[in-house]
Image (cartoon, helix red, strand yellow):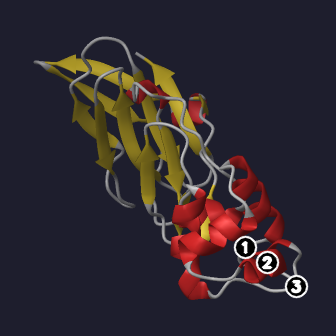
Amino acid sequence: MNTYVTGATIKRLREARGLTQAGLAVQIGVTDKAVSKWETAKGLPDISLIEPLAGALGVSVMELMSGDTVINKNVSSNILRSRFYVCPVCGNVMRSTGDAVVSCCGITLPPLEAEEADEAHEIRIEAVEDEHFVTVTHEMSKTHFISFIAFLSSDRAQFVKLYPEGSAETRLQLRGGGMVYIYCNKHGLMKKKV
């Protein structure tokens, strides 16, 4: 049976917080027998208890429901450690400055892994006045296109959303070192060091 939250997850998180079943029950307004039933897979928490349960266990609702806790060790929020997420259903693009649990259209999204840009996705950068003109050698049809161009450095992020049948180019202020990223809807995330 597929459930929206497992007893093993509740037990692991409860024990990690140093809570007894009775202590957790008091925090969310249920009996310790209810918590015991959840942890032994003899019952499930009511959906109205998910948010208070997540709060008592010190995790987000998404973390509770997925069973994966996320600890962001990126305490300085270095933008170069950003992660990109793209929804395969609607094409939504999200970025975090470290590990996160990201969901869209009912799907938990994995962070994209960037590869070096290849010949079919060549990223060209040309200085123009006080900016840089970034172009990508790539078709821009309704079925195969570059979705975005981004530049990340240690202290700034620039992001330009592109659309099918437009052009795969933009102007960016590339100050200092960093990384230019592009996302092809068929071949994934690619990068080029600046």
Query: Residue 105, image x and y in percent?
Result: 53, 75
Disc 3 to disc 2: CB gap under 8 Å: yes
Give me the disc on residue 42.
Answer: 3
Which residue sits at x=75%, y=53%? 15
Mark nearer the N terminus (3 vs 1): 1
Identity, as a three-letter code, of the amino acid under mark 2: Trp
Of circles 3 and 1, the one toward us is 3
Q: On the rendered image, what quadrant is the C terminus found in?
A: top left
Quarter of the image for the N terminus: give it.
bottom right
| Left or right of residue 4, residue 160 in this image | left
Ranked by sequence position, the earlier of labels 1 and 2 is: 1
- Contact between marks 1 and 2 (CB within 8 A): the answer is yes
Residue at figure coordinates x 71%, y 78% from the top left: 4
From the viewer's perspective, tell me whether residue 6 is left or right of residue 127.
right
Is 3 left or right of 160, judged from the image as shown? right
Q: Quadrant of residue 44?
A: bottom right
Who's the residue at 31% across and 33% down the image? 157
Q: Is residue 88 visible?
A: no
- Tag shown at residue 5: 1
Separation of marks 3 and 1 at Cα, in angstroms: 13 Å
Q: Is residue 160 visible?
A: yes
**Mark 1 to mark 2 CA distance (whole Å):** 9 Å
Query: Which mark, by number, is residue 38?
Result: 2
* Of 29 and 186, the residue lying toward us: 29
Instruction: Judge left or right: residue 159 versus residue 96.
Output: left
